[in-house]
Amino acid sequence: MKLPICNFDAKAGILCPKCDAKLRSGHITKADVDVSNRLVKLASQIPELDRISLVRAYDIDGSIIMVLNSGDVVSLRRDNVLRRKIEHDMGNKMWLVDAQATDRKLLDDLFYPVRILSVNQVWLPDGSKMTRAIIMGRRTERFPLDLDLVKKMVKTVRGIELLAEFEKQ
């Protein structure tokens, strides 16, 4: 398992001077440390987790975003039982994102299982740009995602201002 901190630190729950310096300088965050600790504890129960590589972790409004290498996202999404067990043991809603993903793929990962029809860049009069995602269907009461939370996630992970619109009004 590859983690943002040393595997020994993740197992011990205490940071070595090198990892502590990374945390103080801002190269890693408290969420990276917490998620790494939880994943190492889970790996003792679930051997499949030894094969994943956690690049980064974010904690946004109680939801955990795990930025993983590309193959790891696919393997965790395929195994619903494993994904639910990780989510249950983490105690939070878990979102999986590919580290090498394009902006479009990032949006697809965060909106999963909802389908995005198109993604466009919109240039505003003040010179800034906004990304517009058109979502399939129409917004209903049973829509599975909190759009405000997804917008915060996209802003945090990639610095993208997102405008989400539905295909049918």
Image (spheres, rainbow, N blue to C red):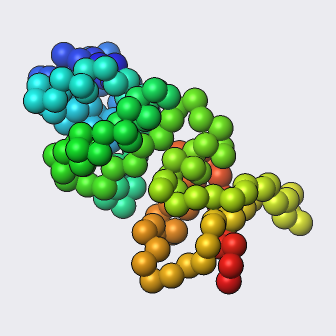
Q: Is residue 49 visible?
A: yes
Q: Position of residue 109 (x, y in %)?
A: 52, 47
Nearer the observer, 125 or 111: 111
- Give the vertical position of 29 relative to 109 (above or below): above
Snapshot quadrant of residue 68: top left
Q: Is residue 56 visible?
A: no
- In percent of the image, x 79 and y 55: which residue is there? 121
Q: Position of residue 90 (x, y in %)?
A: 21, 47
The quadrant of the rendering that contains the C terminus is bottom right
Nearer the observer, 157 or 115: 115
- In percent of the image, x 11 and y 25: which residue is there? 44
- In percent of the image, x 58 and y 45: which residue is there? 106
Q: Position of residue 157 (x, y in %)?
A: 53, 45
Snapshot quadrant of residue 164: bottom right
- Give the vertical position of 48 relative to 80 (above or below): above
In the figure, is residue 90 to the left or right of 62?
Answer: left
Snapshot quadrant of residue 75: top left
- In percent of the image, x 52 and y 57: which residue is there? 111
Nearer the observer, 58 or 164: 164
Nearer the observer, 74 or 9: 74
The quadrant of the rendering that contains the N terminus is top left
In the figure, is residue 115 to the left or right of 21?
Answer: right
Q: Position of residue 49 (x, y in %)?
A: 25, 27
Q: How many marks?
A: 0
